Image (cartoon, grey):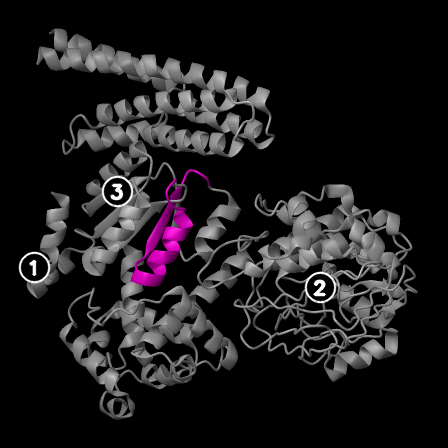
Amino acid sequence: MLLDAMMMEPRKGLMGRERERDQFPVGMRVLAVDDDRVCLKVLEGLLRRCQYHVTTTNQAITALKLLRENKDMFDLVISDVHMPDMDGFKLLELVGLEMDLPVIMLSVNGETKTVLKGITHGACDYLLKPVRIEELRNVWQHVVRRKFSNRETNNLDFSKEYSKHPTTDSYHGLSQVASGSSDQGGSRASKKRKEPHREEEDEDEGDDNDNDAQDNDEPSGSKKPRVVWSVELHRKFVAAVNHLGIDKAVPKRILELMNVEKLTRENVASHLQKYRLYLRRLSVVASQQASIAAVFGGRDPFLHMGAFEGLPSYQPFASSAGIPSFNPHGLLSGVGTAAFGLQDLAPSKAIQCASSNGAVSHCIGDTNKFHIANLQENQQANLAQGLTAPLGQPQLQQKWIHQETSDLSSFFSGSALANTMSGTLQRVTSSSLPPVELLECTQIKVGAHSSIRIPPASSGLLESTTKLDASFVAPEQDMDQKGKFPERVTVLPSESLIAADRSKCGTRSSGSTMLLLSDTERHSKYLKFGVASNSRHGIDEMVNGSFNYNGGASVPEQNDVYDFGNSKLHGGFNSSSCNFDGLLNSIIKVENDDVPFADNDLGCELFPLGACI
Amino acid sequence: MAAVALKNQLNAHIASMFAAGFLDKQFQELQMLQDDGSSPGFVSEVVGLFIDDAEKITGLIAGLLDQPVVDFDKVDALVHQLKGSSASVGAQRVKLSCEQFHSYYEAKNRDGCVMALALLRNEFYDSRSKFQTMFQLEQQIEACS
């Protein structure tokens, strides 16, 4: 019966829709998916109470089928996370990609990591069971929001109809901010430009505009032909965006690069906007969460952290880190709290690399007995943080940074920093930047033979202070006056962590991940050189050995992810120069084989990787 | 009238269930849904489903724990599901014992799980008998009017 009612909808036509729109959110069409029939029944009851049109199914596959049959049949999908026939996240991904409908996740599990996973997979919201009716009363906002933002992207001249709606202004602003510069920027800037813009547009746009003109009065005015953004298509899109650079990625160029038939500029533009919003969401979330590692293993449409899985050598790390069982301090959780054994490394000079995004921070203080607990915490936080790809947002990981700052500052200040580049490091320490981050390689001789090109300023610093053989990748930003390294280039932590672990640095040639954070604003200014902190053993050895990233140290970057042409640490250290345009992090992973470490003699030198903090 | 007396009895019974922690706020939400008049019998329908499902799930868990090699992931999935449904119904005690189960599962401790299952089952059976009393009273009230 319900389904019939649903089918009636399209036939109502404009009039019916208009009527309904007036009553919106009454009559909003919801598809509810939950394998548990009790929960489904309760959910249905609540939704009906909110006067929505509810369709229920206890199978994700059926849900997909329903959605695919008629994309316009539903306004919103609410889905459970744990389902036997298909993972809720997968469903979420598919719906987001194919149908572009808002999806709300439901679960009895409210763990941060799971919630974050939902968010990174594109969920509009994440509700905990048992759901309260008040929460459901509000879900219509997700539908409206999406429609407005879609419209925004796809209509170049929505001037008139948009000016009618007071709410659009806010969405307008949002999209404007979100999409940054693009061809459409001009049109957004001046909403009123109908004619002139028309001339510049492609033909397709004209069509869309016409369509939209008809749909002016409908909230669900998306009569535009829906493009199915398959994984493949999206991959091309991301590649194109990466190539252009996130800031410079304009739909026109993306379209050209993608070279896909029948794809219009609007399609790309709207997808781009979504993508940007998505990235923005990620960064916002990342900055709000102290421990974020949800991206871990998540099959996220935008993120492909696949590399993580592919590294057999990471196994030990993985198990210890308990990646699947991530918990807020997760990455290091398995490692055990006191495990760092840094204490043993007393004379050690390990490189502490922490990236704000979960860089692996090896706190390496030189002679100091670092407070392992502190380090640990920091590292944990770092690791957690690192996994997400912070988009170089200034506010990234503020929380943990502060936390770490407080923890570490004490020992850092007294630490080998004094020995090292005293000036710089201390300045760094005393700065507001979290000490943890860094590169506290007091006396590590990092013999990375492969050269990572470091921006001149920082390299200068390096040279003067360290006897670093290799140049470390350093962000390109200028060092600030304090002589700190420019931004941290964040490298996605996950791999790095792993790499670090397996590297057992020091003696092995295993790759240690270089976590470079690129954090443009606040914290920045220091280079974080991260090695997987996870390996306490690694640390030992790392400390003792020298880091000789010879030749083949390959630095595979995280492919699809944040590789917006920015930070690509290519192949071996030797080969690549890292460009850190600052926004996105990539993981640098040095392959095992490729990085032969010198023997255990670190010959530690003060290691002024700028950031050593 | 008998109906009034029965209603009082029913209300007292439900109140005692709340007091003893068998029910929580979620049950009130369900009652509210039913009381609007739009879905009569909603509560009994949902609770009925819950009882059946819980019975099935606890049986499955017992079966899994009996295996020579316990598949803890499956156990977890089942407990998780039961937790969700008990939470949705407002069966608080059952939900809480599911939560306790979790720690044993995490530790992959079979004996711990067996013990947790026993506790869970106890809570469930207690809850079930309370619910059944509730249904009986409702039916009697219905029969009267």
Residue labelled with disc 3? A57
- What kind of element bears circle 1? helix
Kindly indicate whether the residue at mark 1 contacts the one at mark 2 (C-beta within 8 angstroms).
no
Quarter of the rendering containing residue A491: bottom right
Q: Label 3, label 2: how many angstroms apart (C-alpha)? A: 47 Å
- What kind of element bears circle 3? strand
**Residue B55 screen position, x and y as percent:** 36, 20
At x 44% / y 73%, what residue is drawn?
A236
Q: Is residue A463 above or below residue A330?
A: below
Marks 3 and 2, the one that precedes in the sequence: 3
The quadrant of the rendering that contains the C terminus of chain A is bottom right
The quadrant of the rendering that contains the N terminus of chain A is top left
**Residue A490 screen position, x and y as percent:** 64, 67
Q: Are marks 3 and 1 on the same chain?
A: yes
Counting other residues with Cα less than 10 Å from the Cα at mark 2, is it few (<14), some (14-19), or many (20 or more)? many
* Mark seen at residue A12: 1
Q: Label 2, label 1: how many angstroms apart (C-alpha)? A: 61 Å
- What kind of element bears circle 2? loop
Residue range corresponding to the magenta coloring: A84-109
Residue labelled with disc 2? A591
Q: Amino acid at mark 1?
A: Lys
